[in-house]
Image (cartoon, helix red, strand yellow):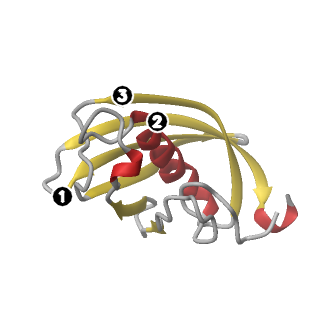
Amino acid sequence: MKKANYCFVCSETNPKGLHIKFRYLENGVAIAEFSLEKEYEGYPGIAHGGILAAILDDAMGNIEYLKGYVAYTTELHTRYIKPSYIGEELIARGWIKNVRFKVVETEGDIRNKAGKVKVRARAKYYLAGKIDEV
């Protein structure tokens, strides 16, 4: 697998993707700031829940990717707390809760700029190995 990817959420090369740029913070959190356009609407004016789940999946999966590893999603549980609006400035975060052998357990959330939680998630990933070796 090459370091450059075609991921729907984070790839800069996917013309139909979201182009969300994650960064890895020193405290072990993967984070990205974004807003969604009307093309990603569910109900009028509200971001589609599936798109938000995909963004959280990437926030949590990018924790290992940004460190040079491939981690495949094996479970994803999402809880929607408040609506996320089209055009609203949002922040997605993911962090590790536990690692057991090759299974990475994570949590994440999407908040608005005021800090109100919009979506929470938890997930498990299978750590397949280093990007250049998989």
Residue 96 makes an appearance in the image: no
- Compared to residue 102, the image places residue 24 above or below, namely below
Which of the two residues, 91 or 103, is positioned nearer the viewer here?
Answer: 91
Instruction: Please identify the quarter of the rendering in which residue 105 is found.
Output: top right
Q: Which residue is mark 2?
A: 50
State yes or no: discs 2 and 3 in contact (Cβ < 8 Å): no
Q: CA distance from mark 2 to mark 3?
A: 11 Å
In the image, what residue type sits under mark 1? Lys
Q: Which residue is mark 3?
A: 79
Q: Relative to 12, is 90 on the left or the right?
A: left
Which of the two residues, 75 or 19, is positioned nearer the viewer here?
Answer: 19
Residue at screen point 17% across, 45% down? 116
Q: Which residue is mark 1?
A: 113
In the image, what residue type sits under mark 2? Gly
SS label for mark 3:
strand
Q: Quadrant of the N terminus?
A: bottom right
- Compared to residue 126, the image places residue 63 above or below, namely below
Q: CA distance from mark 3 to mark 1?
A: 19 Å
SS label for mark 1:
loop
Q: Specify which label sits upstream in the sequence, 2 or 3.
A: 2
State yes or no: discs 3 and 1 in contact (Cβ < 8 Å): no
Q: Specify which label sits upstream in the sequence, 3 or 1.
A: 3
Numbered disc in front, either 2 or 1:
2
Residue 104, horizontal then vertical, whole percent: 61, 42
Residue 3, horizontal then vertical, whole percent: 73, 71
Q: Specify which label sits upstream in the sequence, 2 or 1.
A: 2
Report crowding for label 2: few under 14, some 14 to 19, many 20 or more residues within 10 A (C-alpha): few
Instruction: Please identify the quarter of the rendering in which residue 27 is found.
Output: bottom left
Residue 113, horizontal then vertical, whole percent: 18, 58
Report crowding for label 1: few under 14, some 14 to 19, many 20 or more residues within 10 A (C-alpha): few
